[in-house]
Amino acid sequence: MFASSVARSSIRGVSRSSTVPAVSSAQPFAQVARTSFAHSARRGYASAPSSGSSSNLPLLLALGGLGGLGAWYGLGGFDSGNVKKVASEAEGALGLGALSKDEFREFTLKEVKPYNHDSAFYIFELPDNAKPGMGVASAVLIKGAGDDAKDKDGKPVMRPYTPVSSPATPGHIDFLIKRYPNGAMTNHIHGLKPGDKVAIKGPLPKLPYKANEFEHIGMIAGGTGITPMWQVIQQIASDKNDKTNVTLIYTNKSEKDILLREEFDRLSKSDPRFKVIYGLDKKSGSVPASTFEGYITHEIISQNLPLPGKADKVKVLVCGPPPMYEAISGGKGPKGSQGDLKGLLADAGYQADQVYKF
């Protein structure tokens, strides 16, 4: 048993951003939107590259010279069976999609689909059936179009969100947004109607995912901190040649707050690479027997996540509100740097290079 003083400070994340929209067999899993956690409060949530061939290198070089080389290197090469997939990813890496990392571009809201009691899907049209042009894991910045969505000082309000649609999806980019009573951007978005516009800039690259780089990835997410985790999970699930195992500890206030639960439950039953453990303030309803109540503890981490002794074969990803970071991994450093590793993961023996804070 580990010391309980730190464990009791462990925090669950808060959802921010039902029926999950249908997905095609080529894109079996959706992705969830992630927003800034500035409004979050401390809560007690039960919170080797694929074999490649240099013979494919000319394809990416043709796409963008040295930029293509960089994309190829970052993806770890690829075999002939994955040419189309990797070329699509390279398109995003080279900035050939509908988005721009250098400027905000306006996109029209095509459809709104209710999700649960406080969240909805917002589907924006991409021109000319284009793809967004982003990789896994990446987010974007969203602000109001024109003079919409200003703060009390008259400055534009903008927030980071993660698309729920796959980067390979052409023609639209989707977000799952939770409404907060005092959230300027979430209230603005929830007030939009089909035909309205927002301005989007990106992508904002986070952790570049590479198939088979790790044997086992552990994830600790609170609320909509699930988003970057879901991007990685979706990528793994869509690639049968990726042997990476994933264990997710996903914490929320209540059962109704669990985002994409249907997808997680389906995946955990159908894919032996994937395991999910839910944590709630108080268990109720039809949650799995493995669901825990209250705080994330040392015991929960040590019994479920990959062992730290496997060095570079394991990775643990963390995403949630600032108090959750402090309890689990320590907060991020200045200007988005990773900062020192602290909290439960440090106490459990993980090294800084084994942990990534989104």
Image: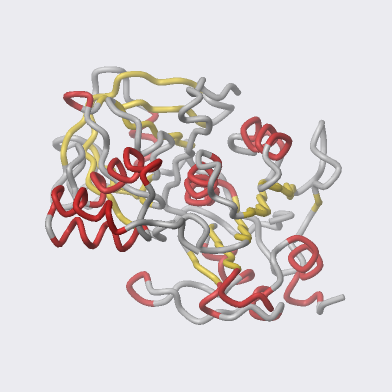
Q: Which is nearer the eye, 302 or 154? A: 302
Q: Residue 300: x and y, percent?
A: 78, 62
Q: Quadrant of residue 12?
A: bottom right
Q: Quadrant of residue 218?
A: bottom right
The relative height of residue 14 versus residue 315 in the rendered view (above or below) is above
Number of marks in the rendered image:
0
Is residue 249 something one can see in this rendering? yes
Query: Closer to the camera, 26 or 202?
Result: 26
Residue lying at 80% horizontally and 45% vertically, measured from the top left: 282
Q: Is residue 232 above or below residue 70?
A: above
- Which one is in front, 124 or 135? 135
Instruction: Give how far across and how far down residue 147 sits, in percent.
Output: 15, 37
Could one spot residue 151 in this view of the protein?
Answer: no
**142 above or below 55?**
above
For image coordinates 40% across by 36% down, the residue present is: 166
Q: Position of residue 79 (x, y in %)?
A: 38, 49
* Picture coordinates of residue 230, whole percent (x, y): 52, 45
